[in-house]
Image (cartoon, coloured by chain):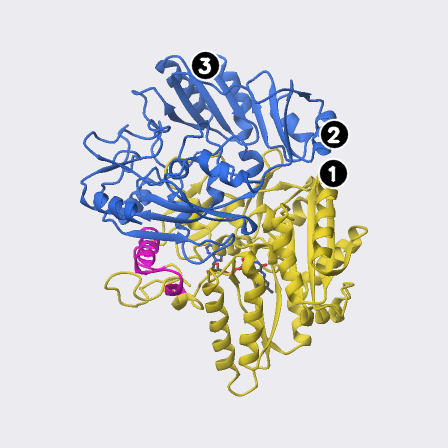
Amino acid sequence: MNRVIEVDVEARVAWVEPGVLNLDLSRMVTHLGLHYAPDPSSQQACTIGGNVATNAGGPHCLAAGVTSSHILALDIVLADGSVARLGGLEPDVPGLDLRGCFVGSEGTMGIATRIAVRLQPNPPCVRTLLLDFMSIDAAAATVSAIIAAGIVPSALEMMDARITRAVEDYVRAGYPRDAEAVLLAELDGLPAGVEAAVAVVDRVGREHGARTVRVAADAAERALLWKGRKSAFGAIARIAPDYYLHDAVVPRTRLVEVLHQVYEIAAAHELIVVNVFHAGDGNLHPILVFDARDPGIWDRVHAAGDAIVRACVAAGGVLSGEHGIGLEKRDLMPLVFNVDDLDAQARLRDAFDPDGRANPQKVLPRGSRCGETMRVPEGAWV
Amino acid sequence: MIELDALARTIAAANAVVVVGAGTKRDVGGAVPSGATEVRVPAGMVSYEPADMTVSVLGGTPVALLDGALAEHGQECPLDPRDSAATVGGVLAGGLSGHRRLRLGPARDRLLEVRFLTGDGRVVRGGGPTVKNVTGYDLPRLLVGSLGTLGVITQVTLRTQPRPQHSSWAVSDAPPDDVRDRLFRPTCLAWDGRATHVLLEGHPEDIASEQARAGLRRVDGPPTWPEHAHRGRASVRPGALGALAARLEEVACSWIAEGGVGTVHIGTDTEIALADARAAVEAESGWLLRETGAPNLDPFGIALPNFELMSRIKDAFDPSGKLNPGRLPYTRVAA
Ligand SMILES: Cc1cc2nc3c(=O)[nH]c(=O)nc-3n(C[C@H](O)[C@H](O)[C@H](O)COP(=O)(O)OP(=O)(O)OC[C@H]3O[C@@H](n4cnc5c(N)ncnc54)[C@H](O)[C@@H]3O)c2cc1C
């Protein structure tokens, strides 16, 4: 199921099958002056179906909103084999927002077979800025200061020193190799508004210690700056052979202190951590890098990861911003939800899939329902 | 909070409850049987962190009060109810979006975290306070538009945004699709069949040049939204607006359509005329929600799509069926 079924240019809607790759969709409609806004860093490899299931985000979701805001309708197969259309192309559908429930449900409410996505017009003016800093604190403080100044960039991404150097060595994106942190900010829209916002970002950045603020001169330079950001995961192999990527969100005003804790936790477990993340949303992606051949390494990786997630929650954050809960974070759910909260979630899931056959045992920890026992039912899908 | 504890006890003890916000949308959805205990949710700001662009308020907070607090920091949360006495909880439970939806998205996209009371008086929290979150199932989306039938919304955290630097209404004789094609993401295209009122927000120079380029004439303000004894809100595919306009020519009504969105605000002086308008909307494969008046008109006119699934959710969240009974038709509508 990897076809784009229909593109309605006038309505700015595309019907796609779930196996369509995210980047392919945007490439396919760009000559129409349109794009699909959610752009996960994995967009060359991930599918619209997977994006729906995880309610994926991406650098440009800061202003445009995450996947849920871009899905109009879904055809799904429920666990009992029945089919349903959720949502619709009309602005409102009577009754409950089942479309909204399904997006982000990680395949536990059924399988999406056809998806109607909203396409956005390409902005007439785009400016991409690279700000570099001599301390990670200054970069993080700049992020909240930009937002506090009333600017919501279309994207605001941060990379720390180690990953900036690794990326630079890997793809030569033109990042300063000696910076302690860089911010990649993008502003788009109509020209006067964009230029005014660029001026604010420039001023706020310098006030917070930006060493240089570079505005990409043309589309080629802009593409190169983004290539650096989007190649970060590939560049990690230059630091160590293996990595474990975390995903958590904190209020953006807590970024400075939480980043400190992340580095301290990694150091305490004798691990290297690099940070490359959707800073504007407060969406951290601490990446623990290591060599899996080191004896006992996985215990340290898991312990550090657990401590990082707990630090984020303690700062008023949540367990995941865009990757979801799955099995990995399932047993951490009680950190953020009490028994009544989990019970309500279990009720919702069970209404879609009473026998728990779709992606069994994911998302909700054991004990979310009263008197439950853990079992994988007959005919379960994974 | 003492008031919330009392509210929880009242709900737990009642056989049926009807949740009342400011009462501005009392006619939306089916009538709740008389004798149900009326409950109101307290009002008030809980917390506001401008630099996070998030705000938490109690469900009974009037939208006007929230807007005033945000304005002090140059921010807004565009729920945009027609009547700003409407409460935040009521607007979200009703699930109706404001006139800036074309650019700013529907009301549901604003909700980050929700707390609600269940029929047995427990508080449930869903979502989270951060601007991005996929921790567990999306209860906030479920509660928006549930018309108080799944839980009583007591507290919400909303995503705010900077107030636009400048906003300006202008008018064009062209239909909304033509106007939209000449503009970059207008905020509202309000069309009455003769003219399109265009709201642009942003930098004043951009607004001026967009208006000039699209041949728009500046006007003082928005069009007059239909104010009649009987009112409905139609939902059609945006592409069907032209055909619907032709059908509405035959109906004694006034209407304004949101171009690019597909919402049509329709007002009539008689109940029959609103029924005729509904027939026109249904002929274009849409549906019409009764918003005000027309007591004999079915609230929705169509069965809930996927009503079996919706009914299972209703039973799971409100097993005793005491919350706003009758508001949403969770059973098959008799033909
Ligand atoms: C290097 C890297 C960078 C990343 N960057 C981002 C980022 O910026 N933003 C972001 O959000 N994520 C990111 N991710 C995570 C991941 O790419 C996203 O979660 C993506 O949405 C998953 O899509 P997929 O097609 O790979 O789905 P899969 O991983 O195959 O599946 C994900 C889940 O969806 C379910 N599923 C798949 N298809 C369907 C369907 N048709 N119906 C119902 N359920 C279905 C699966 O069962 C599974 O539970 C990144 C991952 C990597 C490795």
Image point 49% across, 65% down: which residue? A312
Chain that appears yellow: A
Instruction: Give me the C-alpha separation between circle 3 and circle 1.
Output: 41 Å
Q: Position of residue A134 (x, y in %)?
A: 72, 67
Please identify, in this view, whether the residue under mark 3 or under mark 2 is nearer the observer.
Answer: 2
Query: Do the dots labelled 3 and 1 sit on one chain?
Result: no
In magenta segment, residue B143: no
Chain on which label 1 sits: A
Q: Earlier in the sequence, mark 3 or mark 2?
A: 2
- State the residue position of label 2: B209
Disc 3, SS: loop
Q: Name the amino acid type tagged 2.
A: Ser
Q: Which residue is mark 3?
A: B253
Q: Position of residue A362 (x, y in %)?
A: 40, 63
- Which of these two is toward me, B332 or A155? A155
Query: In the rendered structure, the residue with mark 2 lies on which chain?
Result: B
Q: Which residues, given as a range, are shown in magenta?
A: A333-357
Q: Using residue A164 as the reference point, say whether residue B322 is left or right of it.
A: left
Crowdedness near tag 2: few (<14), some (14–19) or many (≥20) residues, C-alpha within 10 Å: some
**On-image quarter of the C terminus of chain B:** top left
Return the x and y of residue A139 as percentages of the image width and height. Answer: 66, 61
Give the letter of the chain under mark 3.
B
Q: Residues within 10 Å of mark 3 (few under 14, many from 20)?
A: many
User: Pointers 3 and 1 in contact (CB under 8 A)?
Assistant: no
Displayed quadrant of residue A227:
bottom right
Residue contact between numbered discs 1 and 2, judged by CB atoms under 8 Å: yes
What amino acid type should be assigned to the residue bearing mark 1? Answer: Ala
Assess mark 3: CB under 8 A from ligand 1? no
